[in-house]
């Protein structure tokens, strides 16, 4: 921490710039999660939370492991038109990007069952938690 103080006193923002670059790179990365019948939802981790992106596919059926406390929120997404049209008996499409507090909540809502944030994967197969 002394090094950081001295570097900042000299007028360099070395550590801030490195951190900011890391954040910007992370926010560009697209994460996917398999939903139903080989379809996917896509998301992006940002400072605000986790966005599920437009044209992502949500499963329409809820499994027994879906937490009851999220029922009202999922209904809200449907009732406000954020999850729009049914593409099949078991899937819906997201009309516009939806912001969630955390990737965990996004995964649960998208999959219609209990899930973890680590189910989101990048193009190389690494999980969001890695």
Image (cartoon, rainbow, N blue to C red):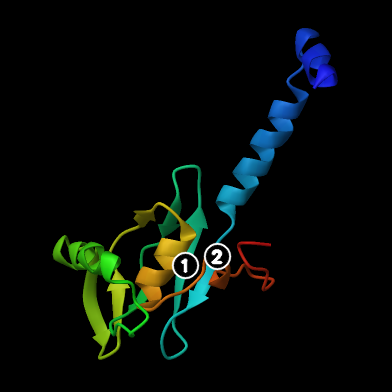
User: Which of pointers 2 and 1 lies earlier in the amino acid sequence?
Assistant: 2
Answer with left or right where residue 8 lies relative to residue 122.
right
What residue lies at 44% left-to-right and 83% top-to-bottom?
39
Between 46 and 64, the one nearer to me in the picture? 64
The disc placed on residue 42 is: 1
Can you identify the residue that label 2 sits on? Answer: 31
| Dot 2 alpha-carbon crowd within 10 angstroms: few under 14, some 14 to 19, many 20 or more | many
- Against 45, residue 89 (above or below) is below
Between 49 and 83, the one nearer to me in the picture? 49
Considering the numbered disc 2 on the image, is that residue within a helix, a strand or a loop? strand
Indicate the position of residue 16 as horizontal and vertical percent values.
Answer: 69, 27
Indicate the position of residue 61 as horizontal and vertical percent values.
Answer: 29, 85
Indicate the position of residue 5 as horizontal and vertical percent values.
Answer: 78, 15
Q: CA distance from mark 2 to mark 1?
A: 6 Å
Considering the numbered disc 1 on the image, is that residue within a helix, a strand or a loop? strand
Label 1 near label 2: C-beta < 8 Å?
yes
């Amino acid at each position: 921490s002394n090094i950081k103080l001295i570097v900042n006193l000299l007028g360099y923002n070395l550590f801030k710039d490195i951190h900011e670059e890391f954040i910007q790179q992370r926010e560009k990365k697209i994460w996917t999660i398999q939903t139903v019948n080989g379809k996917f939802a896509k998301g992006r981790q940002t400072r605000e939370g986790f966005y599920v992106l437009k044209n992502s596919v949500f499963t329409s059926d809820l499994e027994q492991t879906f937490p009851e406390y999220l029922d009202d929120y999922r209904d809200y997404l449907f009732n406000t038109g954020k999850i729009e049209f049914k593409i099949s008996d078991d899937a819906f499409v997201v009309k516009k990007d939806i912001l969630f507090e955390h990737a965990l909540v996004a995964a649960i809502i998208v999959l219609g069952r209990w899930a973890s944030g680590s189910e989101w994967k990048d193009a190389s197969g690494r999980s969001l938690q890695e």
